[in-house]
Amino acid sequence: MKKWMKQLAIALDQLVNAIFGGTADETISARAHRNGWKRLERGINWLLLDPRYCLKSYQSELLRSHLPKAYRTGAVK
Protein backbone atom coordinates (compact mmCIF):
# COMPACT_ATOMS: atom_id res chain seq x y z
CA MET A 1 0.00 0.00 0.00
CA LYS A 2 1.32 3.41 -0.86
CA LYS A 3 2.37 5.47 2.15
CA TRP A 4 -0.21 8.22 1.55
CA MET A 5 -3.01 5.64 1.29
CA LYS A 6 -1.98 4.10 4.60
CA GLN A 7 -1.84 7.54 6.22
CA LEU A 8 -5.29 8.38 4.84
CA ALA A 9 -6.72 5.11 6.18
CA ILE A 10 -5.24 5.83 9.64
CA ALA A 11 -6.61 9.39 9.58
CA LEU A 12 -10.10 8.15 8.72
CA ASP A 13 -9.87 5.50 11.43
CA GLN A 14 -8.89 8.12 14.00
CA LEU A 15 -11.66 10.46 12.81
CA VAL A 16 -14.31 7.78 13.29
CA ASN A 17 -12.85 6.99 16.72
CA ALA A 18 -13.03 10.68 17.70
CA ILE A 19 -16.62 10.98 16.43
CA PHE A 20 -17.57 8.13 18.77
CA GLY A 21 -15.97 9.75 21.82
CA GLY A 22 -12.38 8.52 21.57
CA THR A 23 -9.22 10.59 21.45
CA ALA A 24 -8.18 12.09 18.13
CA ASP A 25 -4.84 10.30 17.93
CA GLU A 26 -5.97 6.76 18.72
CA THR A 27 -7.24 4.15 16.30
CA ILE A 28 -10.41 2.16 16.85
CA SER A 29 -8.42 -1.07 17.07
CA ALA A 30 -6.12 0.27 19.80
CA ARG A 31 -9.12 1.63 21.71
CA ALA A 32 -10.98 -1.67 21.42
CA HIS A 33 -8.02 -3.51 22.94
CA ARG A 34 -7.38 -0.90 25.63
CA ASN A 35 -11.03 -0.89 26.72
CA GLY A 36 -11.37 -4.66 26.57
CA TRP A 37 -14.12 -4.58 23.94
CA LYS A 38 -13.70 -8.24 23.03
CA ARG A 39 -16.48 -8.50 20.41
CA LEU A 40 -15.23 -5.47 18.50
CA GLU A 41 -11.62 -6.62 18.88
CA ARG A 42 -12.45 -10.09 17.53
CA GLY A 43 -14.34 -8.52 14.63
CA ILE A 44 -11.48 -6.21 13.68
CA ASN A 45 -8.93 -9.01 14.03
CA TRP A 46 -11.09 -11.27 11.82
CA LEU A 47 -11.68 -8.55 9.22
CA LEU A 48 -7.96 -7.80 8.95
CA LEU A 49 -6.96 -11.49 9.05
CA ASP A 50 -4.65 -11.05 12.03
CA PRO A 51 -5.64 -12.51 15.42
CA ARG A 52 -3.36 -10.01 17.21
CA TYR A 53 -4.08 -6.87 15.15
CA CYS A 54 -5.75 -4.88 17.95
CA LEU A 55 -3.06 -5.87 20.44
CA LYS A 56 -0.34 -4.76 18.01
CA SER A 57 -2.20 -1.48 17.38
CA TYR A 58 -2.36 -0.83 21.11
CA GLN A 59 1.34 -1.63 21.54
CA SER A 60 2.16 0.67 18.61
CA GLU A 61 0.30 3.49 20.37
CA LEU A 62 2.25 2.88 23.60
CA LEU A 63 5.58 2.86 21.76
CA ARG A 64 4.52 5.78 19.55
CA SER A 65 5.91 3.81 16.62
CA HIS A 66 3.36 5.34 14.26
CA LEU A 67 4.81 8.82 14.79
CA PRO A 68 7.70 10.44 12.90
CA LYS A 69 11.07 9.82 14.57
CA ALA A 70 11.32 13.38 15.90
CA TYR A 71 8.19 12.83 17.97
CA ARG A 72 9.17 9.37 19.17
CA THR A 73 12.53 10.41 20.56
CA GLY A 74 11.20 13.53 22.20
CA ALA A 75 13.77 15.59 20.29
CA VAL A 76 13.03 19.28 20.20
CA LYS A 77 14.21 21.22 17.18
Image (cartoon, grey):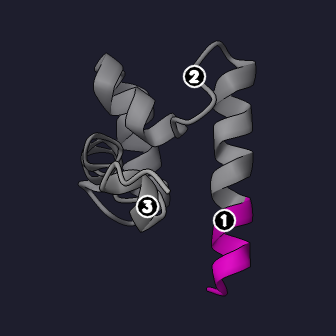
At which x and y percent is residue 42? 35, 40
Question: Quick one: SS at disc 3?
Answer: helix
Name which residue type carries label 3: Ala
Query: In the figure, residue 23 lies in which quadrant?
Result: top right
Q: Residues within 10 Å of mark 1 (few under 14, many from 20)?
A: few
Query: In the figure, residue 21 lies in which quadrant?
Result: top right
- Taking the spot 58% from the left edge, 19% from the top edge, the residue there is 22
For the residues labelled 1 and 2, the Cα–Cα distance comes to 17 Å
User: In the picture shown, does residue 1 fall above or below 19?
Assistant: below
For the residues labelled 2 and 3, the Cα–Cα distance comes to 21 Å
Q: Earlier in the sequence, mark 2 or mark 3?
A: 2
Q: Check residue 3 for magenta coloring.
A: yes
- Taking the spot 35% from the left edge, 43% from the top edge, the residue there is 61
Residue under circle 1?
Answer: 7
User: In the picture shown, does residue 57 fall above or below 36?
Assistant: below
Name which residue type carries label 2: Thr
- Image-based side of 74 in relation to 11, left or right: left
Q: Check residue 35 for magenta coloring.
A: no
- Taking the spot 72% from the left edge, 33% from the top edge, the residue there is 16
Question: Quick one: SS at disc 1?
Answer: helix
For the residues labelled 3 and 1, the Cα–Cα distance comes to 17 Å
Residue under circle 2?
Answer: 23
Q: Earlier in the sequence, mark 1 or mark 2?
A: 1
Q: Which span is picked out in magenta?
A: 1-8
Question: Quick one: SS at disc 2?
Answer: loop
- Image-based side of 36 in relation to 66, left or right: left
- Image-based side of 9 in relation to 29, left or right: right
Residue under circle 3?
Answer: 70
Q: Nearer the viewer, mark 2 or mark 3?
A: 3
